[in-house]
Image (cartoon, rainbow, N blue to C red):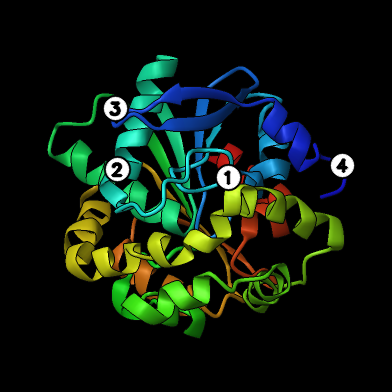
Amino acid sequence: MSDVLSAQDWIAQYETLTSRRGHRIAYRRRGAGPAVLLLHGFPTWSYDYAHLAEDLSADHDVVTVDFLGYGASDKPNPYPYSVAESADVVEDLAAHLGLESVVLVAHDYGGIVGQELLDRVLRGVLPFSIERVVVLNCGIVYRAYQPTRLQKLLALPVLGRFLAARITAGRVRAGLDDIRGRPLGDAEFDGLWEGMSRRDGHKLAHLLIGYNAERAVHHQRWEAALTRWQGPLQLVWGLDDPVSGRHVLDQAVERLPNATVTELPGVGHYPQSEAPGSVAAAIRAR
């Protein structure tokens, strides 16, 4: 990524905490102002947000975190990764940093974690408050979500492990380019691969993709949490995303009529890196 920190420098600015389950979790905090917590997706890591974090840190307290199994956080293998534990990690981070209220920005897998956090808000058990929710491309409507063929294969018990062990940088790059509005540049991909492949994290894909099986079980509860959420909600959406693009947005808008919508034509699955200026403007516009 040009004009932003390299992935190595991004990691060098990390601090760490130990989660309630004893895992080392890597996070980064920069800037001052209202707290903004950025939750990344599968299969990448918080470096997705490098451009957006730099922009927002001019007037916000910007916090990014690598979920367990991603980036520079611990990557136990084998391990039963779960959405619930990812939400626990967010709770642990908020407590560690003394965050009382945040603007929650969530993308892809982070969107599911965000829905779990909202469910905890509605149940009165989340120990911090969420001031506003900004959702980037995510399968928030389960019936409209269209996983890629590789995601479906990775979820298969035996074949998934076989495929994950044979994932290469070239295959990952091709897969990411397939769902973006524009292909990654060499420097962009190298930065993403730095964290994805750290301690062979890319070979955990068959374990991390388990969130799709969880979503099949819990999607009604998670969708209800977003529907029942009474706070400000923004949908900032790349329309040219084959996984969760306009086809998901159209159904989401029907269910969430009070949401503010920012449509991004020509942008694919990663608005935060494909159109970071537009995403930052939407966040600031409230």
Examine the image and state in which quarter residue 186 appears: bottom right
- Residue located at (30% from left, 25% from top): 128
Q: Nearer the viewer, mark 1 or mark 4?
A: 1
Which of the marked residues, 1 or 4, is nearer the chain's N terminus? 4
SS at mark 4 in the image: loop
Callout 1–callout 4 Cβ contact below 8 Å: no
Q: Which residue is mark 2?
A: 85
C-alpha distance separating marks 3 and 1: 19 Å
| Image x and y of residue 49, in percent | 64, 45
Tell which circle, 4 or 2, labels the residue nearer the N-terminal end: 4
Which one is earlier in the sequence, the residue at label 3 or at label 1?
3
Closer-to-camera residue (244/92): 92
Task: Find residue 20 and name its label.
Answer: 3
The first of marks 1 and 2 along the sequence is 1
**In the image, what residue occupies the spot 53% across and 31% down?**
26
Per the model, the C-alpha gap separating discs 1 and 4 is 21 Å
> What is the distance, in whole Å, between disc 4 and disc 2 at their CAs?
34 Å
Q: Secondary structure at mark 3?
A: loop
- The answer to whether the residues at label 1 and label 2 have Cβ atoms under 8 Å apart is no
Name the residue furthest top. Answer: 98
Crowding at label 3, few (<14), some or many (≥20) Cα neighbours within 10 Å?
A: few
Label 2 SS: helix
Marks 4/3: CA–CA distance? 36 Å
Check disc 4 and report the residue beneath it: 3
Is residue 214 visible in this depiction of the protein? yes
Q: Amino acid at mark 1?
A: Gly
Q: Residues within 10 Å of mark 2 (few under 14, many from 20)?
A: some
- Residues marked 3 and 1 touching at CB (< 8 Å): no
